[in-house]
Amino acid sequence: MARSRTVFYCLECGYEAPKWLGKCPGCGAWNQMTEEVRQPLQTAVLPRTAAKIMPLAAVDETEQTERLTTGSHELDRVLGGGIIPGSLVLIGGDPGIGKSTLVLQAAQGLGSAGKQVLYIAGEESPAQLLLRAKRLGVDSEHIMVLAETDLNLLEEQVRQVRPDVLIVDSVQTVYSPNLSSAAGSVSQLKEVTAMLLRLAKRENIAVLLIGHVTKEGQIAGPRVLEHMVDCVLYFEGDRQHLYRILRAVKNRFGSTHEIGLFTMGAAGLREVANPSEWLLSQRLPDAAGSVVTASMEGTRPLLVEIQALVTPTRFGNPRRTAAGVELNRVALILAVLERHVGIHIQDYDVFVNAAGGVRLVEPAIDLAVAASLVSSFRDRPTARDLLFLGEIGLAGEVRGIPHLEQRLHEGARLGFKRAVVPKFSLAGLQNTAGLQIHAAATVAEAINIC
């Protein structure tokens, strides 16, 4: 007979050890090892027919190509066009950021389209959920509520109802009675997610899981769920501000570079129809260190304000701080400016920020970062109608970037008249969208232009 065993797992990364350790060997966190007694799984073996082997070309793709639209264009964009039936989507974010509001409004859109939605309320009673639904204007008759956290009872109810979409709020509250560990532990999360995955694939039900994050920003403590699901969405933003950003970090059915922008109000989340205009709405007219660039987020070009502040250091070691852009790229650009442009900033504190709370990772914003640093260092603002596009190499060259025409069209739509672009990209440029183009082969040329 199998016996129970005691294991210790890390709350941060899920590393398991046979004994308690002060420092986790997996992630290096201190005092995060938690004891858990695991019982052998006692489940009856139910007879079922095995899946049939078939040629790949004979697979019916109609069930996987008909996406379910949620009524939210921003959410559908991040998902790749809508929810795929039979997929498992994990939505993570800080407590109170608006995850439940997002899925409840999505349930309203699905219900309005005639889809059956089953909402598993693990953290709220049906009466509490009704109060929030009334505040958000959610009144679809196709939304059903089940206040249940027992995994076996939940599975039985889902198989009877067979909804089109299943929402679990949240996955940490659901537990399997076959395991002795508490709900939310690593073993429970694995078991619950595995069962929901099997349920989604066999019954062709789209499942939306809500997962909280830890102080390290990881979904449900350890990142044991991200490899099991089809799509992982992060809901980001500051609870003290109105704006929220929905970002895909994993998507088997679409791009992982798309983002959705929302504003939070008393009536719930509202989509931002023109993100570029919103990101530039608070830009000062003649501020030194303020430069605009166009970044591609999936298929969408976004105009973003890059801000830089260069000030003499008060201490021995100058500070280098970056928010929304990679700090390593900022250090690279500073070295190129010093070597190839003659801008000596080694005795200055440098702060770089992508305004609006967005996070930019593509190198096409390098030239804008360099221009903002020089503008702040010399205390001379750049032209308000000038756009900066280009990647910077270690030799001081401005390298070509993709999707140049789309970036220029977005700039022209918001009133920009000129653009500094890589000289290399002019060869394939067919439409400048009416902008005056300044080609630069090196960083020094680009700085002289602006």
Image (cartoon, grey):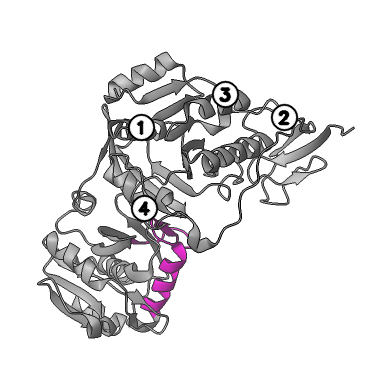
Q: CA distance from mark 2 to mark 1?
A: 31 Å
Q: Are marks 2 and 4 in contact (CB under 8 Å)?
A: no
Q: Which mark is residue 107?
A: 1
Q: CA distance from mark 4 to mark 3?
A: 30 Å
N-term mark: 2 or 1: 1
Q: Are marks 1 and 4 in contact (CB under 8 Å)?
A: no
Residue 400 visible in the snapshot: yes
Instruction: Say which quadrant the C terminus sits in.
Output: bottom left
156 is higher (above) or lower (below) than 315? above
Q: Within 10 Å of the Cα at label 1, are there few (<14), some (14-19), or many (20+) other Cα atoms? A: many
Q: Nearer the viewer, residue 331 or 402?
A: 402
Q: Which mark is residue 149?
A: 3
Q: Nearer the viewer, residue 352 or 263?
A: 263
Q: Within 10 Å of the Cα at label 4, are there few (<14), some (14-19), or many (20+) other Cα atoms? A: many
Q: Within 10 Å of the Cα at label 3, are there few (<14), some (14-19), or many (20+) other Cα atoms? A: many
The residue wearing badge 2 is 179
Does residue 180 show up magenta in the picture? no
The residue wearing badge 4 is 80
Residue 213 visible in the snapshot: no
At x 74% / y 44%, what residue is drawn? 16
**Figure quadrant of residue 197:** top right
Say what amino acid the circle numbered 4 marks: Gly
Q: Residue 38: where, in percent of width, then height?
A: 77, 33
At x 73% / y 27%, what residue is drawn? 180
Q: Are marks 4 and 3 in contact (CB under 8 Å)?
A: no
Q: CA distance from mark 2 to mark 4?
A: 36 Å
N-term mark: 4 or 3: 4
Q: CA distance from mark 1 to mark 4?
A: 18 Å
Say what amino acid the circle numbered 2 marks: Leu
Q: Secondary structure at mark 3?
A: loop
